[in-house]
Amino acid sequence: MEQTTGPYPPPEHTPEPAFLTGLTYGVLFVLGVVLGLIGSFQFSWEVGSVPVAAIALSLVNLAVFRAAGWAMESRLGAVVPAVPWLVILVVLSSRRPEGDLVVTGTAAGYVYMLGGAVAALIAIVWTRSARPWMLTGAPRPPDPR
């Protein structure tokens, strides 16, 4: 006896277009750059001696990186915005020849740097990948068709 799923035939699996996936990863990359730039210039707001902006920005990073991984159904989705965020952070926290730097070595600066890096790691580990072969280097599973 043949089992049916209802009056309609099951939908055919259509692979997602590579262009759309690449475009989405490009948008996530730009989002990481924007997060890094905005956060690096706004992390130092404090209430008393509590670096509230650095804490809030770290939580925003966690939410954005995790949402990106969830939306792309892969850990790579969480990695793509986290990497440019980290690169921007390293560049803006490095001393220039003139002695200037944007992300300073204050309590707020350390909370922003460490909190954002930990948020990226948590988001990457927390994301379940629907395609685990993408980051492990394992061969792609055969198409079930």
Image (cartoon, rainbow, N blue to C red):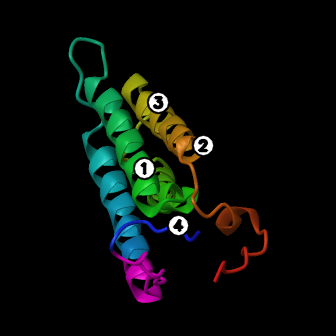
Q: CA distance from mark 1 to mark 4?
A: 41 Å
Q: Nearer the viewer, residue 62 or 20?
A: 20
Q: Nearer the viewer, residue 15 or 92?
A: 15
Residue 80 is inside the magenta segment: no
Residue 6: numbered disc: none
Is disc 3 placed on a helix, strand or loop? helix
Magenta stretch? Answer: 8-23
- Image coordinates of residue 137 in percent, x first then y, are 76, 69
Image side of residue 75 versus residue 39, left or right: right
Residue carrying label 2: 125
Is disc 1 placed on a helix, strand or loop? helix
* Placement of the C terminus among the 4 image quadrants: bottom right
- The amino acid type of the residue labelled 1 equals Phe
Is disc 4 placed on a helix, strand or loop? loop
Determine whether 115 is above or below 24 in the image.
Answer: above
- The amino acid type of the residue labelled 3 equals Tyr
- Image coordinates of residue 138 in percent, x first then y, are 78, 68
Is disc 2 placed on a helix, strand or loop? helix
What residue is shown at x 54% (from left), y 38% (from top)? Answer: 122
The single residue placed furthest to the right in the displayed view is: 138
